[in-house]
Amino acid sequence: MSRVEVNGTTLYYEGAGSGPAMLFIHGMAGFAGVWADQQARLSDAFHSVAYDRRGHTRSPKPADSPAESVELHADDAAALIRALELAPVILVGSSGGARICLDILRRYPELVRGAVLSEPPVFALSPAIGEAFMARVKPAVGQALGSDDPSSALDAFFGIIDPPFWSSAPEERKAMYRQNLPAMMADLQMPTYQLSTDDLARIDRPCLVLSGSESLSWFHDIAAIVAGAIPGARLQTLEGAGHATYATRPAEFERAVRDFARSLGDASAPTAERSGAPT
């Protein structure tokens, strides 16, 4: 159990393996442990770090924390990369975590070797998709919040975006997600992250965009826009995977990440295991 003070908060993180550095960033209501399986799979060749984002599980949200935004979480991640001496790092993000990766690529490219972006929900790229998503999600979540069990909002949310992932998740993992209900609500209520295809066209780091064949068409369409706009980016569909590609098809996800990382070569890649902070 390790913690580091960065950017006005304290972030909990977990490290594994040694080799070129990877930073895993979780999505909505998640936590570092969702990446434990991938970290174990990749530990033979890579040093990976996964962390609880600000306001999630073991990383507190200070009372004076700035307003919730993708940019704030990207600033946290950039500070973590520097504190743990991971740069240049390979970013791996799922859903909202992939959206944070995009902001790091935009504003902190010097910290990044490349990025794996799994279904980033960048709805500013298609306002119609964003409106359709919110029109389906918000009423279901709102109804659950008004019930005798507000934590059932997590069931409502994940029951829409990835039913197989949620139905197969162990109860102890669901309990940790439910603990992050306030963080989920903050995510849903924060301003739409503004990103254009022109912004994406200026990204100059190698990127792999992943999508699950069984995911919702909204996510497929956004993934295709992202991959098409980033120079040299490749779009890969993981057959049988839902929105949580890393969980629903873990072996295929690992293979995609491993192959992408190997394609980057070893130049300027940190190779020592790094703890970077007192525990």
Image (cartoon, rainbow, N blue to C red):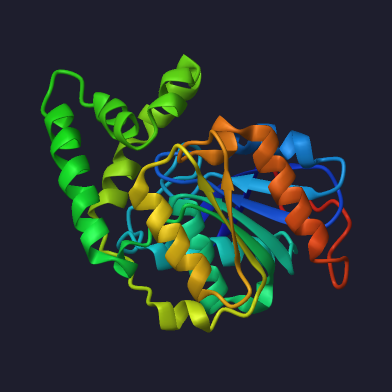
**Position above or below: 250 against 23:** above
State the image coordinates of residue 185 (x, y, percent, origin top left): 26, 44
- Please identify the quarter of the rendering in which residue 263 is found: bottom right
Q: Residue at x 41, y 30 (%)?
A: 177
Viewer-proximal residue among 269 and 127: 127
Rendered location of residue 267, percent (x, y): 87, 72
The x, y position of residue 265, in whole percent, is 85, 66
Give the image quarter of residue 183: top left
Look at the picture and state if 4 lies above or below 43.
below
- Tally the marks: 0
Image vertical order of residue 41 relative to residue 87, above or below: above
| Residue 17 visible in the current orientation | yes
Q: Is residue 76 above or below residue 108?
A: above
Task: Identify the residue shown where x is 56% and y is 72%.
Answer: 105
| 204 vs 78, nearest the viewer | 204
Q: Residue at x 49, y 38 (%)?
A: 244
Q: Quadrant of residue 117?
A: bottom right
Give the x, y percent position of residue 206.
67, 70
Residue situated in front as seen by the camera: 200 or 101:
200
Residue 231 shown left or right of residue 100 in the figure: right
Q: Which residue is more in the foreground, 27 or 117?
A: 117
Which quadrant of the rendered structure holds the C terminus?
top right
The N terminus lies in which quarter of the figure? Answer: top right
The residue at the point 36 percent across, 28 percent down is 178
Residue 8 in view of the camera:
no
Horizontally, is 173 left or right of 151 in the view?
Answer: right
Q: Residue furthest top?
A: 171
